[in-house]
Amino acid sequence: MIQGSYSPGLVAMSIVVAVAAAYTAIDMARRVASTRDRVSRGWLVGGACAMGTGIWSMHFVGMLAFRLPMPMGYDPGITLLSWLIGIAASAFALWLTARRRLPPHLLAAGALVMGAGICGMHYTGMAAMRMQPAIDYQPWLFAASIVIAVVVSGVGLFLIHFLRSARRCLLRLRALAALLIGTSIVGMHYTAMAAARFPLGSICGAAQDGLHSDWLASLIILGSLAGLTIALVISVLDQRLEARTAVLATSLAYANQELSHAALHDALTRLPNRRLLEDRLVRAIGANARFALIFMDLDGFKTVNDAFGHHMGDLLLVEVAQRLGASRRHSDTISRQGGDEFVALVHIETHAEAESVARRMLDLVRQPITIENQELNISASVGIAVHPDDGSDPAMLLSNADAAMYRAKERGRNGHCFFEPEMNARALTQLQLGQALTPALEKGEFFLLYQPKYGALDNELAGVEALVRWNHPGRGVIGPDEFIPLAERTGLVIELGAWILDEACRQLAEWHRRGQRMRMSVNISVLQFGSPRLLDDVQACLARHAVQPEYLTLEITESIAMRDVEHSQHMLRQLRGLGVEISIDDFGTGYSSLVYLTRLPASELKIDRAFVQNLAEGHEDAAIVAAIIALGKALGLTVTAEGVETPEQQAFLTRQGCDLLQGFLLGQPVPADALHAVMDSVPPAGDRRQVCALERHHQPGTRPREDSLRTRAAI
């Protein structure tokens, strides 16, 4: 027999190629298993080509490492066939290991098929030499090579499947597995090579027209390693891209979830908002369910805001929301509608069950609440509407529950009230007025009346206060008590306040052109005061109508001024910088700190009418009024009393040193043209009969309430 020899360098390279091919097989199996459809099939084809080429390259390099003392060559066609057998075997291996489960019987069958493929590739490659006479194989080594191929295939398939399905596949573990599989394949190859015997006188039939070994080894080694490297690089890059895509997809899904939650939940309390409540109302109505809509509004919430600021108010709302949310049943919905309004959708069988839920909600709110070491005690008013008895659509049910809540407030608050049919008229009126506000402003249905102010000592006309009214086409003149709360709910109060300011400046400019140097007071609402456009609106009105700013006074209620002292100081300084005067209205009804009050750039204090009404009866309010007047004088402020209705009140305020007086005794709100006569000829001191007669001519019917565009909490 002809004795051959091996090239140590090529043997070593064959081992390297075998290990690289095994590592690629493990990685490709992970890619095939982790993808779907076309992408998975693409990785299967590409991985089979890379893995098959690697295994075949190891086999062919191992053959090239074997040297015989004769010219050697390899038939191209048979060599190509052996390469295709290697790719087919690799494709089968990747397909099998990509399965979710690999039971023992399937693993055994796969090992047989894969082992046959590897043996077929090897012995077909050996046949490419076209040896004459044919290669003689030793039976026991030949059988051993087949057994090794099957065992190696079984072990390889198991490891590849295990490692591709492991959630955390360490690089070291994958490398050890690749080394085991690669060396096992090399062992099978060289066992098969040892089984080959070449008789004396043998020649290589492919030596003349086949592939020659002098350059083939280098080409195959470089090509296979390059192919395996490229496959691994592409796999790693794709895996990183997939990981980043997964992270982005997760982030996007989370963002979408947050946006969806934000669109359907209140940002402060995290309760369902009006939109989500209406959706659940529609579903409940569609299912013909019997349920109660419980509309709850907090009593005294405005007082908390005024006394402690918005921060405490927000924390109070959060605590109430948590209490209500924790007590709800699984089938119920607790939502926040805005401000201090909460609505519960409660599935019930009887009115008594709805009443029980309402009482429980009231009890939860009445329990003392401690926020930042401050104990707060509030109550609530609750209105209840039942479906289908009190309405068959969401808007009607909400409106009726709202109307019932208002009735509960009228009955003394801190209680509940079921909707009754006679409440429909009020609820409908509120709904209609709210919807008509914006068109009314656009059509110019609002107008101003002007209530005069007089000097306490000389009874001279000192100025006027602008008061807004609504000339409703169907209901006639409507006072601000009815429409201002609606305007505050819708936010229209900012636009309305801007119009009032502009109209007051226009009228003031007209009086000045007539030579009547009148002073004008205009009330600023809480929303208007908090709006960033207020400063620009005031400046624009003064410039548009060429009004000297010192003739314009902006009245800010005490509660507004003390709500956020830092903001109030900043805003009032800016307004004072324009030259306008600042008046602190309704003084004595809030929770002012004298330290902060002295820092406000105000020029006037207005005593609230609530203190003036009881002066003639010797009420304790007399002491409060005297103290306020003394305080104003000490601070160098002009002190004005509003709500003067009797001569006794006028006399008391004058004796105490009050500067200006305003009230029905001295003059009711009248249109601008009615003031012209008063400006031209003021009646003698103590005799206002001509003025009052003139005012009654312009204000027929019952005596109107003194009112203005002042802020209120939504009741």
Image: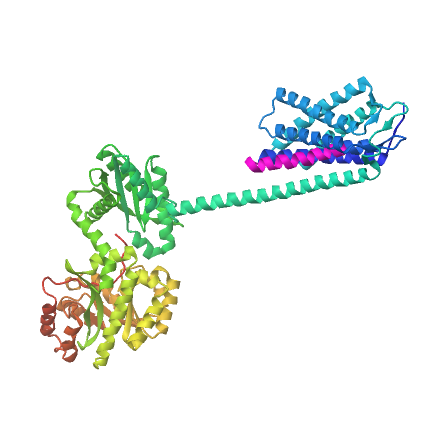
Q: Is residue 277 above or below residue 581?
A: above
- Using the image, determine if residue 693 lies above or below residue 410: below
Magenta-highlighted residues? 35-58
Confirm whether residue 305 shows in the render: yes
Disc count in the image? 0
- Residue 273 coordinates in the image, percent (x, y): 34, 46
In this view, the residue in front, 238 or 122, is: 122
Residue closer to the observer: 529 or 118: 118
> What colouring method underlies this structural image?
rainbow
- Please name whichever residue, 597 or 194, is drawn nearer the observer in this view of the structure: 194
- The residue positioned 63% from the left and 44% from the top of the image is 237
- When asked about the image quadrant of residue 220, the answer is top right
Q: Residue at x 87, y 33 (%)?
A: 71
User: Residue placed at 78% from the left, 40% from the top?
Assistant: 219
Residue found at the far bottom of this picture? 515
Can residue 367 be seen by looking at this rendering? no
Q: Quadrant of the N terminus?
A: top right
Is the residue 176 above or below the residue 599 in the image? Answer: above
Whether residue 51 is in magenta: the answer is yes
> Which of the 4 quarters of the picture holds residue 292?
top left
Residue 275 position (above or below residue 59): below
Q: In screen coordinates, is 684 left or right of 51?
A: left
Query: Quick check: is 536 in the magenta stretch?
Result: no
Q: Residue furthest top?
A: 140
Quarter occupied by residue 76: top right
Main secondary-structure element of the magenta-colored stretch:
helix
Q: Is residue 36 left or right of residue 530?
A: right
Residue 100 percent location from the top left of the image: 57, 28
- Spot the residue most to the front: 209
Horizontal and vertical percent position of residue 429: 18, 52
Residue 91 in picture, x, y percent from top left: 65, 31
